[in-house]
Image: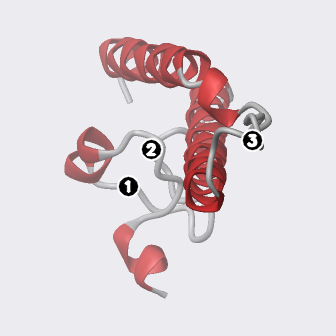
Amino acid sequence: MTNHDAAYYITKLTALVAELEGMDQATKDSRSTVILDQTSVGRLSRMDAMQQQAMANATSQRRQSEILAAKAALSRIDEGEFGYCVECGEDITPKRLDHNPTVATCITCARG
């Protein structure tokens, strides 16, 4: 990988991390504990609020996984291992990396 390629992927991955962290921060309130006035809110409203909270928590967990994957890809760039499959050591195609720069395996290993 050339220095130009590395700079491109560093920029792309850094922007992805910033975007995901921003989205996670913006939805922080929807993940907080559900507190409802029991006298004015019915059972279905409470259940709906709890379901929305659970969905927000699941989305946050998925974002955190994506952030970790992006940071791992940045580490692989620093170590000179980016673009190589972590399982077989073969090159990951540029097309695959352009589609998702966080991937750590070639298409053959990903398929199993």
Q: Is residue 7 above or below residue 88?
A: above
Q: Residue furthest front?
A: 39
Q: Quadrant of the N terminus?
A: top left
Residue denoted by label 3: 39
Q: How far across and how far down the image is residue 96, in percent?
A: 27, 53
Is there a contact, CB below 8 Å, between mark 1 and mark 2? yes
Instruction: Characterize the local packing of mark 2: few (<14), some (14-19) or many (20 or more) Cα atoms within 10 angstroms.
Output: many
Q: How far across and how far down the image is residue 76, in percent?
A: 62, 35
Image position of 66 (left or right of 3): right
Q: Is residue 29 above or below residue 111?
A: above
Instruction: Characterize the local packing of mark 1: few (<14), some (14-19) or many (20 or more) Cα atoms within 10 angstroms.
Output: some
- What element does badge 1 sit on? loop
Which numbered tag is attached to residue 83?
A: 2
Instruction: Characterize the local packing of mark 3: few (<14), some (14-19) or many (20 or more) Cα atoms within 10 angstroms.
Output: few
Of badges 3 and 2, nearer the viewer stands 3
Q: Residue at x 39, y 39 (%)?
A: 101
Residue denoted by label 1: 92
- What element does badge 3 sit on? loop
What's the CA distance linking mark 3 and mark 2?
58 Å
